[in-house]
Amino acid sequence: MKITLSNIFIKNKITISLLTLMAIGFVFRIHKLGYYSLFASDDALTALAIKNIVYKGYSAFPSGLLYPKELFFSYPTAWICKIFGINEFTLRIFNLPFSIALIPLIYILGKELYGKGVGLLSAGIITFATWQLEFTRYVRSYILVQFLFILSVYLFFRVFIKEEKISKLLVFSIFTLAIFTSFLGSMLLMTFLSLWLIKGKRAFKPITIVFFTSYILVIIGWLQIYGSMIDPFVMNYSGNTYTLSAILQKITLPQFVMLAHLTKHYPVFWYSLLFVFFFIFLYFARQLTFKKQRGYYLTILALSLFCLPELAALVIYGYTILNRNNTDLLKRRTIITSLSILSIGIIFWFFYGLFFWGKPVIDIIKQINIFKFPPLVYYFYFFKQFPAMSLMVIIGLLLLYLKGLKEKGGEAAIFLSSLFIGSIIFMPFPINHSLPRYNFPIYPLFILIYVFSVIEIARRLAGLIKFKKLAKNLATISSAAILLLSTLEHATPQEAWRLTNLHYGQPVIHPYLATSPYLTHYFDYKSAANFVKVNLKEGDLVLTTFERLVPYFYIGQVDYNIYFYEDKAMAFGDFSEKAGPGSDPYLESGGICSLARLKEFIKDNLRQNRRIWLITPNYTRLKDTNEKVVKERLDLYQDFFVFLNYNPQALAYVAQDNLTEVYEFNTTNFAR
């Protein structure tokens, strides 16, 4: 056969398509990669730790507090910065190869589970997904841990589900890298849940038990190391702590506080108890016959009355999957009875909350939050920004569930659905607060299920046509295209280009699930901080509001931070009226928590002929006041902004975003 370009393309069309997507992805991701200043405190935390690695050789903050988090991200980035210098580009460049490598990786995983069509379409969506593009620009490990998570899932499926001869030590090493990159890596424990649901008793092989136990010990060790370094500092300021017993007291229900207290000094016992109990139950649930289901029903009732409906739902799901080959156990009556018992528990807690906590009936979502129902909280984050895609994912999960029940060889369906559901349910356990960005590692799974749902629905619609194969294929393609065009969100070339081609001052249209859920502008702290740095003289004082860590990164000095939101201010240091230098756990700065104290502070220092520099994003300049954070800060800082308006002569610089301002207070321009 004659070798032509068309022949080469036909033979290698998948490879060429992936290379094309990777090239496009590279252009979108590297464009203006170093243009913006650091975005927020999280960005600056990692950047400050990296800077300390460059100059002192270990990960720590200016206060001396060690930072054992994100080690696999921080040290390679520090090596890059040591060679090429510390700037926004070098701080972000380590994310770039992993963000691009995720494109072929999601194709490989999708192909492994459901074929080339699902894989290639998923790769195309991930290429233009604005969430992916935005996180590539953060000086954080989210892209890296997402890549390690998906790579671990893929290798786990091949090694433990398909039982291919791949080094299990390699798989364990990547699992370990994931947990040492971010605590979100602990969600990989759900791969073992998937394995159990697929293999049943056959999952209890010695190598699997050793792998599972070892990874549990890695997680416990990491949490204890992190807790021992962070707790003595953070606990003093915010009341937050990362030891296992403290996490359990914060994230679990009041019913378990006593148990957490009893196991305060034995975190290994608690985690072992938690997982052993759950897996033992699933094992015995599989042995139950249709006539002897009391234990199964009682467990659902107990979990529901303990206000743990998510675990009860998982038990129902696991029970039916484990018994998928036993048609007697899957009779309609069993499912209806299970769901009825679950509903009784939810209704009980609803009315308990209504009458004893005095919460309004209309606010169903908040009512569920009060119920400590974390899966709805985390899936709600997906639903808020991707409503159409989230509905498609729900349909896709149902289709995967039915596929796993009815079809032989439904391992892929069970694996993907249980991994996604299990990760959502498990997510509150390794963390002590709820943030949208914690969904990021499982976003590729979200896309895979979405694409599967689109293709499966299109295929079933085409099946209604009683024509030839060609007509059905055209109908399938047309239906899939219509579904994609009507439901795909935040993953188009136009949106991707707009996000990556913004100038300071333009609003950011990004998914709600960004690092800061209310960030609508990229604040230009860089030029504002550089202005201060150039004009700073010995004896001058630097004050900041909100994001004190970002100006510190650029200036190397922040003496006091102004924070009027007292209940949240404690998380950033001791912001009492007497707080002085050194009260911040991350910097050597102090705190000012009232306008009266600020005025007094300025007057006292001006008497000593000391200049004062103040850096602040002026929220009165934002036109979109519908954002929660804008309203919140305008209300809290209303008098503060009035105070600034009465001192226009002190305004020394306005940054490129037309929002961030620098005020210079000296003996000649201070009015009030």
Image: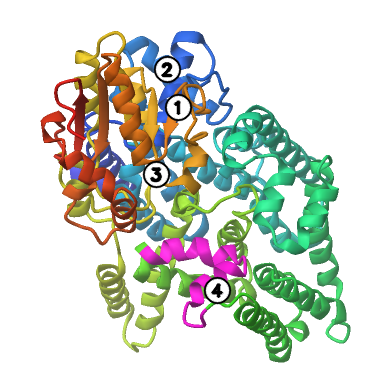
From the viewer's perspective, tell me whether residue 479 is left or right of residue 565: left
Asked if the magenta segment contains residue 368, the reply would be yes
Of the numbered discs 3 and 1, the one sitting upstream in the chain is 3
| Picture residue at 73% right of the left edge, 62% below the top | 254
Q: Residues within 10 Å of mark 4 (few under 14, many from 20)?
A: some
**Residue 564 disc label:** 3
**89 and 653: which is toward the camera:** 653
**Cα distance, mark 2 to mark 1?**
22 Å
The answer to which image quadrant residue 408 occupies is bottom right
**Callout 2 touching callout 3 (CB < 8 Å):** no
Of the numbered discs 2 and 3, the one sitting upstream in the chain is 2
* Residue position for label 1: 590
From the viewer's perspective, tell me whether residue 552 is left or right of residue 429: left
- Quarter of the figure that contains the C terminus: top left
Badge nearest the viewer, 2 or 1 = 1
Q: Secondary structure at mark 2?
A: helix
Magenta region: which residues? 360-384
Type of amino acid at the residue the image marks with label 4: Gln
**Residue 51 disc label:** 2
**Residue 367 disc label:** 4
- Quarter of the figure that contains the N terminus: top left
**Callout 2 touching callout 4 (CB < 8 Å):** no
Q: Secondary structure at mark 3?
A: loop
**Residue 337 disc label:** none
**Cα distance, mark 1 to mark 4?**
38 Å
**Cα distance, mark 2 to mark 4?**
44 Å
Type of amino acid at the residue the image marks with label 2: Lys
